[in-house]
Amino acid sequence: MDNDRYYMQLALEQARKAYALGEVPIGAVIVKDGEVVASACNTTETDRDPTCHAEISAIRLAAKKLGGWRLPGCSMYVTLEPCSMCAGAIVLARIEKLFIGALDPKAGACVSLSSIVTDPRLNHRVELQTGVLGEECSAILKDFFRELRASRKSVSPEDI
């Protein structure tokens, strides 16, 4: 469990990078044999690309580093429950284990709205663990959206 907390802390560092960029603060880390092979944060706004979620970017980096699109033996640590796009990519990449910080009741596709990564109808299922540093992962998102709402309220119609 200590290793899981350590790797989730690294994912939280990535989430903080996203926060500093004005991105939704989500971070992902991919580990194989105790070595971090990839880490990434959300960059959808920065890159103007809806596929630049932390999980997708981390998968791309890991595939390049490991030399193939299949990532057997890899574990992913992500601060927020992956959406359907990311959950599908995790299955396609054959990631072995997925550790999630906070659940996402509005878009989560691993536990909350659906269970893509554990669906027995698919050709690969991912071992899943939720709640790793859940409070910390949830807090950064709450802080981000609280700040975002406050900044939008501070803009008056005359300023636009």
Image (cartoon, rainbow, N blue to C red):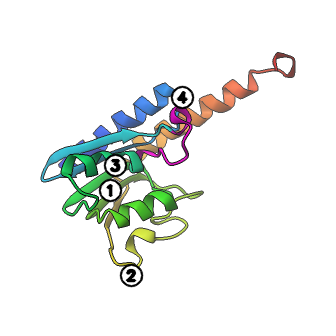
Residues rendered magenta in the picture: 44-54
Whether residue 5 is visible: no
Residue 76 is drawn in which quadrant? bottom left
Q: Earlier in the sequence, mark 4 or mark 2?
A: 4
Q: Amino acid at mark 4?
A: Gly
Q: Position of residue 126 (x, y in %)?
A: 32, 68
Q: Earlier in the sequence, mark 2 or mark 1?
A: 1
Q: Amino acid at mark 2?
A: Pro
Question: What residue lies at 55% left-to-right and 67% top-to-bottom?
Answer: 113
Asked whether residue 115 is drawn in magenta, I would say: no
Q: Earlier in the sequence, mark 4 or mark 1?
A: 4
Q: Position of residue 122 (x, y in %)?
A: 39, 78
Quarter holding the C terminus? top right
| Residue picked out by circle 1 | 99
| Residue picked out by circle 3 | 60
Q: Is residue 66 left or right of residue 69?
A: left
